[in-house]
């Protein structure tokens, strides 16, 4: 996901959460729906074209047909509950995700550590290691992330800082841009 997509999604969440939370829209709708559950629906009587009502004097089949109808308010409440539980789980996960990475700033990245990509560490950016190139002449034997490893195998050297920075920003890197950065 690109940074702009993430910002757009977060803005949408904030707008909806603000509307539903601040204006009490969700709480009011939930209370209203709860008040209607079981109140007169399904109805115990139904007007007939002849003018008489089907009610206590109705046949067993008519009473069964009336009582078998689903209560839309109860169904809406059940679905709202399911969505609220799902949203709570999703927001809790996103909070844990943000907490996990909020204190991992680029200044905290140790360029000499073996548990990260040595090439990305030049930018003070963290990437998990993928492989250590052992048979590439001129390429240091340090762990690299998948992207840097692929560049090292294809180009015979670590990626230049310009394309590497673009990669960490989520920008696509063309073959022409890579060639220019390598001076070819």
Image (cartoon, grey):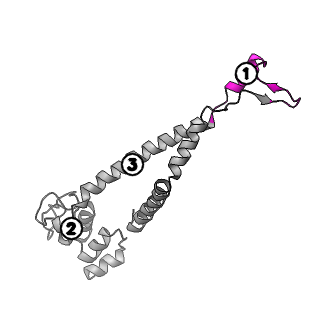
Query: With 121 as the anchor, is 39 left or right in this view?
Result: right
Does residue 174 appear anywhere in the picture?
yes
Q: CA distance from mark 2 to mark 3?
A: 27 Å
The image's mark for residue 90 is: 3
Q: Position of residue 144 (x, y in %)?
A: 20, 62
Label 2: which residue? 106
Asked if the residues shown at circle 1 and circle 2 are in contact, with their CB atoms under 8 angstroms apart, the answer is no
Q: Position of residue 170 (x, y in %)?
A: 35, 68
Q: Which quarter of the figure is the C terminus placed in?
A: bottom left
Residue 69 counted in the magenta span: yes
Quarter of the view holding residue 178: bottom left
Q: Which quarter of the figure is the N terminus placed in?
A: bottom left
Q: Which residues are magenta?
A: 47-71
Q: Residues within 10 Å of mark 3 (few under 14, many from 20)?
A: few
Q: Nearer the viewer, residue 106 or 147?
A: 106
Q: Callout 2: helix, strand or loop?
A: helix
Q: Position of residue 28 (x, y in %)?
A: 54, 48
Label 1: which residue? 63
Q: Callout 1: helix, strand or loop?
A: helix
Q: How many marks?
A: 3
Q: Residue at x 27, y 77 (%)?
A: 162
Asked if the residues shown at circle 3 and circle 1 are in contact, with their CB atoms under 8 angstroms apart, the answer is no
Q: Nearer the viewer, residue 149 or 123?
A: 123
Q: CA distance from mark 1 to mark 2?
A: 70 Å
Q: Position of residue 113 (x, y in %)?
A: 12, 61
Question: Which of disc 3 and disc 2 is earlier in sequence?
Answer: 3
Question: Which of disc 1 and disc 3 is earlier in sequence?
Answer: 1
Query: With 170 as the anchor, is 124 left or right in this view?
Result: left
Q: Nearer the viewer, residue 46 or 145?
A: 46
């Amino acid at each position: 996901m690109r940074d702009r997509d993430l910002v757009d999604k977060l803005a949408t969440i904030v707008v909806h959460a603000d509307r539903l939370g601040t204006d009490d829209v969700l709480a009011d709708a939930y209370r209203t729906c709860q008040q209607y559950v079981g109140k007169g629906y399904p109805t115990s009587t139904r007007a007939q074209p002849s003018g008489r009502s089907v009610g206590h004097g109705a046949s067993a089949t008519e009473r069964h047909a009336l009582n078998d109808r689903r209560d839309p308010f109860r169904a809406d409440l059940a679905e709202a509950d399911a969505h609220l539980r799902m949203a709570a789980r999703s927001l809790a996960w996103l909070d844990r995700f943000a907490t996990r990475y909020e204190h991992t700033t680029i200044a905290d990245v140790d360029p000499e550590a073996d548990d990260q990509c040595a090439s990305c560490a030049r930018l003070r950016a963290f990437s998990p290691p993928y492989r250590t190139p052992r048979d590439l002449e001129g390429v240091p034997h340090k762990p690299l992330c998948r992207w840097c490893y692929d560049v090292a195998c294809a180009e015979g050297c670590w990626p230049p800082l310009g394309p590497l920075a673009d990669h960490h920003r989520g920008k696509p890197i063309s073959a022409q841009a890579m060639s220019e950065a390598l001076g070819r």
